[in-house]
Image: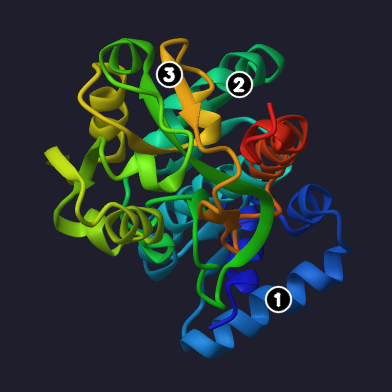
Amino acid sequence: MDWDLYRYFIAVAQTGSLSAAAARIKVSQPTVGRKISELEGLLGYPLFLRSPRGLLLTQEGQRIFACVHKMEFVENELNHIINQYNANDAGVVHLSASEGVSMHWVMRWIPGFLDSNRNIHITLNVSNSFVDFTRGGSDIALRAGEKGPNNLYSRKIADMKFGLYASKDYFDRHSYPETLEELYSHRVVGAIGNLISFLPADWMQSLSKGCAAPFSSNSLISNLIAAEQGIGISLVACIVAQRSSGLRRVLHGLDTPSLPLWIMTHPDTRKLDRVKKLTQFIAAQARHDAAAFAGLE
């Protein structure tokens, strides 16, 4: 049944007259009369009685009003939520990114964004696994490697270069490798678990066959820390390594891996003002840091 008929019914029940209901809804009095007659015809019984005090609800009308009044309240609440969600830029944006990107890039620019957008709250989901957008886990995701599924809007914002790094302390205790052959005499940081299937880690495994690998982990951040602690040479994203004052890059001319960094948004939420603001800010920040991502700084 057409909910609009009940809007007219509620207005008449609350005002007690067709003319007052018409003024509230901003339609003509005959229109209100026709809508009430139509509703009574569909229900099969009268809803109002005429009296000197105006239109009064019948017993059946009272029962109907008690129900639809609750429905009107729920509808108003729903419209309020929808209008808040769509009409302004306030609210929460759920951002997902891998641990390295989150800790060494995202956290650097979040303060500036929040200072300029005080009505937006960011939740950061640090995960190396792909986030299921359909379950509300994310509005924006940053992922290096493969482009997202076709049901997402994916845009490449940077080329993330990896390089070989070790600490100054490590090189104080070992010779500095000038060639690939000299690298084979050094200790390297290895990968285990799911990290083995990550393209840069797999490249490192192939490169370092025959090298001593005293430490391995399934975490790029752990491998970064291992390099900082002088355990060995590790493959690290250049933009991450450049934030560490204790690391030194080796073999600059080596053809090390590079992965595209994608920003992904869901078609249903990407046009929300707050999501658009954060998406545009991230893309602008990536352009600003393009040289750092490419390992040129």
Circle 3: element type: strand
Q: Quadrant of residue 25?
A: bottom right
**Image point 62% across, 30% down: which residue?**
90
Is 217 positioned to the left or the right of 52 in the image? left
Q: Determine if residue 53 is in view.
A: no
Give me the disc on residue 53: none
Looking at the image, which residue sits at the far left?
214
Rendered position, 205 above or below 285: below
Who comes first in sequence, dot 1 or dot 3? 1
Q: Residues within 10 Å of mark 1 (few under 14, many from 20)?
A: some
Q: Determine if residue 245 is in view.
A: yes
Amino acid on which the number 3 mark rests in the picture = Leu
How far, Cα to Cα, is label 1 from label 3?
77 Å
Q: In x, y percent, where is residue 29?
A: 84, 63
Determine which residue is flagged by label 2: 109
Q: How many marks?
A: 3
**Image point 44% across, 58% down: which residue?**
71
**Image point 23% across, 26% down: which residue?**
226
Determine which residue is flagged by label 3: 247
Q: Quadrant of residue 8?
A: bottom right
Circle 2: element type: helix
Who comes first in sequence, dot 2 or dot 1? 1
Mark 2 vs mark 1, foreground winner is 2
